[in-house]
Image (spheres, rainbow, N blue to C red):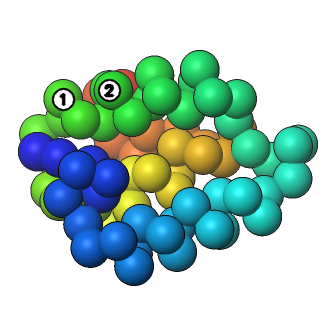
Amino acid sequence: MCLLRECAENGMLDDIKMRIDKLSDGERADAETYEARLSCCKKCEHLISGVCMKCGCYVEFRAAFKKQKCPDVSNRKW
């Protein structure tokens, strides 16, 4: 189980970082929340190569949104 920043090609991670940078302050989670979410995701059995198998998202992108939640509705991690 790894995040994109640990296992992906630079192009994909760079694209996600660019999209996160374009989020407004009102949309974007603060850095502490973001890192806490990623820490939870990294321990999750549904994470495969940076992708959440519950919803198909790149966790680095989903975790960046203030109003997003863990997609595992039966056992939310964050």
Percent across and percent down for residue 46 are: 17, 47
Relative to 34, is 65 on the left or the right? right
Identify the residue at image location x=58%, y=24%: 33
Q: Residue at x 32, y 53 (%)?
A: 5
Q: Is residue 4 left or right of residue 21?
A: left
Q: Which residue is mark 1?
A: 43
User: Who's the residue at 24% across and 66% down the image?
Assistant: 8
Residues 54 and 30: in front is 30
Q: Quadrant of the N terminus?
A: top left
- Say if 27 sits above or below 57 in the image: above
Q: Would you place residue 67 above or below residue 75 in this image?
A: below
Quadrant hosting residue 72: top left
Circles 2 and 1 in contact, beta carbons < 8 Å? yes
Estimate the x, y position of residue 51 in percent, counting from the top left. Answer: 27, 60
- Residue 16: which disc? none
Q: Which of 49 and 11 lies nearest the eye of the viewer?
A: 11
For badge 1, the amino acid type reads Lys
How far from the left and from the top, in percent, is residue 31?
63, 29
Residue found at the far bottom of this picture = 11
From the viewer's perspective, is 40 left or right of 27? left
Q: Secondary structure at mark 2?
A: helix
Q: Is residue 54 visible?
A: no
Vertical position of residue 49 compared to residue 72: above or below: below
Callout 2 amino acid: Cys
Q: Residues within 10 Å of mark 1 (few under 14, many from 20)?
A: few
Local secondary structure at mark 1: loop
Q: Circle 2 sits on which residue?
A: 40
**C-alpha separation, residue under disc 2 versus residue under disc 1:** 5 Å
Residue under the point 72% across and 58% down: 21
